[in-house]
């Protein structure tokens, strides 16, 4: 994600908070907001990132993205790993909200760890279609990830 020291980042569905730590290590003036709708996962994210929270680089909230509040044009990067939010029709209003809280030029990264299969490719195409329909320009990245698995990412850039 090419994290810059001043980035303002949101992770949706932070789980155990492993990616939050990796991002926080690269921040100086920036900050990462980590949200998870599971109280257990939000707690584990907080425990895992205690040092960064004390330094003001991480803020953890227990909330679904649907009810998370961020000002417009605020964030430079939003990402999610293995979160089932980006290709379901019911979720598409949330993609508009993601675009509106990103600054112009901001980026949305939708990561997935998936089997090497036709359904994975169909899922990637569906994710790109949804992002494009909501005003993002998209590219995709695919790298091998263990035996028979892929790490996929659709990157959407806000074309304001
Ligand atoms: C499969 S886990 C992935 C966790 C972590 N990103 C990882 O890759 O290890 C999905 C996580 O996303 C959270 N989640 C799912 N939908 C969400 C939403 N709409 N808003 C916030 N969190 C959500 C779940 O509670 C869960 O912790």
Image: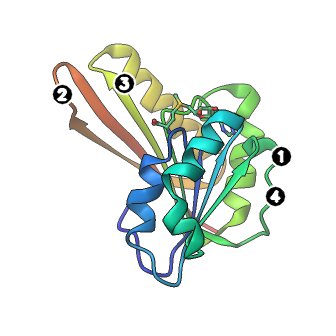
Q: CA distance from mark 3 to mark 2?
A: 17 Å
| Beta carbon at label 4 within 8 Å of ligand 1 | no
Q: Earlier in the sequence, mark 3 or mark 2?
A: 3
Residue in front for this viewpoint, 59 or 46: 46
Residue underneath mark 3: 121
Whichever of labels 4 and 3 marks the residue nearer the N terminus, that label is 4
* Distance from the alpha carbon under mark 4 to that under mark 3: 32 Å
Q: Label 2 near label 1: C-beta < 8 Å? A: no
Question: For the residue carrying disc 4, how many other residues have a C-alpha within 10 Å: few (<14), some (14-19), or many (20+)?
Answer: few
> In this image, 75 relative to 117: left or right?
right
Which structural element holds mark 4? loop
User: In this view of the protein, which residue sits in the foreground, 105 or 31?
Assistant: 31
- The residues bearing labels 1 and 3 have C-alpha atoms spaced at a distance of 30 Å
Q: CA distance from mark 4 to mark 2?
A: 37 Å
Q: Identify the mark at residue 67; answer none if there is no mark.
A: 1
Residue at the spot of label 4: 69
x then y, percent, for residue 94: 74, 43
What residue is disc 2 on? 146
């Amino acid at each position: 994600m090419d994290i810059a020291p001043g980035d303002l980042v949101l992770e949706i569905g932070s789980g155990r908070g492993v990616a939050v730590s990796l991002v926080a290590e690269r921040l100086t003036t920036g900050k990462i907001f980590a949200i998870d709708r599971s109280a257990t996962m939000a707690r584990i994210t907080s425990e895992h990132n205690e040092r960064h929270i004390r330094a003001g680089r991480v803020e953890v909230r227990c909330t679904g993205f649907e009810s998370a509040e961020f000002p417009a044009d605020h964030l430079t990067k939003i990402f999610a790993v293995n979160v089932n939010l980006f290709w379901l029709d019911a979720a598409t209003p949330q993609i508009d909200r993601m675009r509106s809280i990103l600054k112009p030029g901001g980026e949305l990264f939708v990561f997935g760890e998936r089997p090497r299969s036709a359904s994975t490719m169909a899922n990637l195409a569906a994710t790109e279609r949804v992002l494009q329909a909501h005003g993002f320009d998209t590219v995709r990245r695919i790298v091998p990830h263990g035996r028979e698995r892929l790490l996929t990412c659709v990157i959407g850039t806000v074309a304001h």
